[in-house]
Image (spheres, helix red, strand yellow):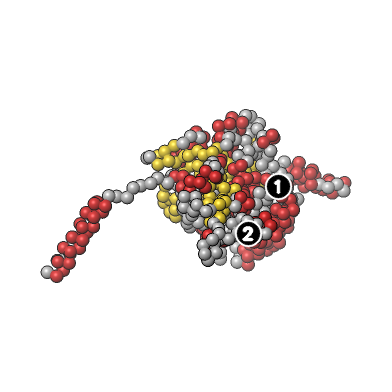
Amino acid sequence: MNQQTLSAFIWSVADLLRGDYKQSDYGKVILPFTVLRRLDCVLESTKPAVLTELADKEKQGVNPEPFLLRKAGQSFYNTSTLDLKKLLGDPDHIAQNLFSYVQAFSPAVRDVFEHFEFHTQVERLAKAGLLYQVAEKFTQIDLHPEVVSNMQMGLVFEELIRKFAEISNETAGEHFTPREVIRLMVNLIFIEDDAILSKPGVVRTIYDPTAGTGGMLSVAGEYLAEHNPQARLTVFGQELNPESYAICKADMLIKGQDVANIAFGNTLSDDGHGHKKFDYMLSNPPFGVEWKKVEKEVRKEHESQGYNGRFGPGLPRVSDGSMLFLLHLLSKMRPATEGGSRFGIVLNGSPLFTGGAGSGESEIRRYVLENDLCEAIVGLPTDMFYNTGISTYVWIISNRKPAARKGKVQLIDASGMWQKMRKSLGSKRKELSDAHIERITRLFGDFAEAEQDGIPISRIFDNEAFGYHAITVERPLRDEAGNVVLGIKGKQKGKPQPDASLRDTENVPYTEDVSEYFKREVLPHAPDAWIDPDKTKVGYEIPFNRHFYVFKPPRPLAEIDAELKQTTDRILDMIKGLSA
């Protein structure tokens, strides 16, 4: 049975649900039942051995769990004598028997069904008189590992997830990143390591703190399997939405990953992988979502632990928490002495420039740039995501930059690289083609400046190019006669007093000498001005669009006049025609 046939078959279950279920709720039944049938098939051959082992160990009074796992040959087991086919033999008690069957799974699997709220769905199906039919439908499908491999099963499951995300696209963006964006990010974080990753038996870890349904982790796994079938990628993640968490964990189960590595809960207030470090990381955190709910815990960690915690460099404004995820990922990087890390994170435009010198946002940018952690920022086209049409940017961060990249940041403007989708999904109207992904990956891999039709699309800057000194320019306070008012006591005695209403600030590029800039730009206009050195702050911003702006001179006036005259003549002719 190929993937399409399999998906189509599972999809046919939707016909049974029509009328009793809203379209956007089909996934609540079909996804957990697909998982249940797969696990059912995977455990079938070892079931007798597991049950014998269970009886044996219970007789001995020994904890059976490690022995049952060994007998099952999986990271999970089931101790019930029932399976899906046996359940059908007792139609009157199918709901109770199904509950006891699911309860007999090992804890990690039970957790998946609890977060799917499977109990509620079973009761709802039973009430609608559909439970037996749905269960029977799933027993007709052969999901034994020798018929459908883990890889195939993972693809089928992902296709179903995608279909349900499209149906209920009002929430799709919350737990779904477009697959082509993930593919681009995976390419960018792996490209410089192709030599390492192609060695046989290499084992690497990858982590997503906002795992959603596990799409990023899946695509990364596929990439590695394609490039080096002997390489192993151990995946870790955390997810806040119960249904997405269940789907992600189920997907990992289906693919034979250790589901204990997927944590539930809020990454910012309750890190499910405290003190762990990873080789690679990927994240698409929520954009522009306030972090008021976790403010108390985040502030406490920032103030009490400083740089020993995750939020040492600074805190962004409460209205947008996406930069907190950037800080969280920085704290999960393996030290450079132990091989270092690289990660990709999708952010909206505001982390590039929001917040003046000294603000939390500016301090976070300062930390990233002064520690030489930013390899590249890629500007994506608008209308790429299901729940927002705004511009988005992929930041590639690494503490093991190749020699050529040291001290530099590459900006790639890929906003013009897109193709129109045949059918819009929510706010998503554009997509990246394979050729676009390849082009962007090559621009990154080449690490060179590039143009397209005379317009720059790749530029390289020194880290310092984004820094500036914010200076405070003071002018003297004058009395009614126009004389400068001098201080009369303490340190200020005999010194001109500043006039707060004339106070101004200037941002001086980091690469410029402040006093030279002051002499050139300020003194010619205000000869009595001075800088207050105590108020000087260092700031960082990345004015991405400004670096790709190309000035187009306006058309000649004569040309515009001729066009206007043509239009007015045409209007006059029309009026003449009407009056005739």
User: What numbered label is drawn on residue 239?
Assistant: none
Name the residue rendered at 65%, 56% in the picture. Answer: 492
Is 283 placed left or right of 95 in the picture? left
Badge 2 crowding class, 10 Å Cα cut-off, few under 14, some 14 to 19, many 20 or more, is some
Q: 502 or 506: nearer the eye? A: 502
Name the residue rendered at 69%, 42% in the picture. Answer: 277
Pick out the residue farthest to the bottom. Answer: 579
Is 487 placed left or right of 434 in the picture? right
User: What numbered label is drawn on residue 307?
Assistant: 1
Question: Can residue 283 be seen in the rendering of this structure?
Answer: no
Determine whether label 1 and label 2 are within 8 Å by CB. no
Mark 1 lies on a secondary structure that is: helix
Q: Is residue 364 above or below residue 462?
A: below
Q: 227 or 301: nearer the eye? A: 301
Where is residue 509? Give x, y as percent: 53, 45
Amino acid type of disc 2? Gly
Q: Which residue is mark 2?
A: 487
Amino acid type of disc 1? Tyr
| Quadrant occupied by the C terminus | bottom left
Where is residue 557? Give x, y as percent: 26, 52
In front: label 1 or label 2: 2
Is 249 placed left or right of 424 in the picture? right
Where is residue 312? Give x, y as percent: 68, 49
Q: 428 or 535: nearer the eye? A: 535
Where is residue 300? Give x, y as percent: 72, 56
Q: Where, by quadrant of the figure, is residue 197 drawn? A: top right
Pick out the residue farthest to the left. Answer: 580
Q: CA distance from mark 1 to mark 2?
A: 41 Å
Name the residue rendered at 58%, 35% in the picture. Answer: 406
Q: 91 or 457: nearer the eye? A: 457
Q: Is residue 329 above or below residue 165?
A: above
How many circles with numbers are drawn on the protein? 2
